Image (cartoon, rainbow, N blue to C red):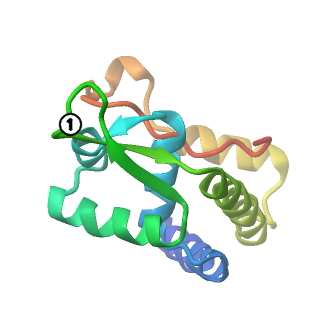
Amino acid sequence: MLDHLARRIRLRAEAVLAPLGLRPRHLIALTVLRAGSGISQQALAGTLAMDATNVVGLLNELETDGLAERRRSPQDRRRHVVELTPLGADRLKNAEHALATAENEVLGALTPADREQLYHLLRGPPAAHQPKSAGPSIHAPTRAE
């Protein structure tokens, strides 16, 4: 049942992201950039658990659309620092709104109490039972965001 629900949400999410020129990997990268302003390209690769070569391709796409910007680190000219642009922040906000609408479409039959219970269950066991994370967490926007 969870797999079916995940597929429905993924398909709907991809459909609402496409008109914004985004794919799920773009959304995740933009979310990380918003949380970690001025993150190094290497740290971004680690957070996204992506090969550095793939991160370069991803950043090329985001830069071409004006959503992110790479620049040399003033402290270490060999490193690049990646930042979310104002356009990227706006696009991310629009994407989050579109995703909230898509989520409402998919989960519309659930009562607010049922949704809260589903969200609670999907978050998993209490933190004491979860493995420690090596990097910053990426959180899904709350319904209020």
Residue type pointed to by label 1:
Arg
Closer to us: 127 or 109: 127
Closer to us: 73 or 115: 73
Is residue 48 among the parts visible in the rendering? Answer: yes
Is residue 51 among the parts visible in the rendering? Answer: no
Q: Which residue is drawn at 51% across and 35% down?
A: 35
Against 126, residue 113 (above or below) is: below
Residue 144 rendering spot, x and y as whole percentages: 80, 41
Q: How busy is the neighbourhood of tag 1: few (under 14 within 10 Å), some, or many (20 plus)?
A: few
Q: Which residue is the site of mark 1?
A: 77
49 displayed left or right of 123: left
99 displayed left or right of 47: right
Q: Residue at x 22, y 56 (%)?
A: 50
Residue 66 rendering spot, x and y as whole percentages: 55, 64
Residue 57 rendering spot, x and y as whole percentages: 28, 69
Against 12, residue 107 (above or below) is: above
Residue 19 appears in which quarter of the rendering? bottom right
Residue 131 rendering spot, x and y as whole percentages: 26, 28
Q: Quadrant of the C terminus?
A: top right
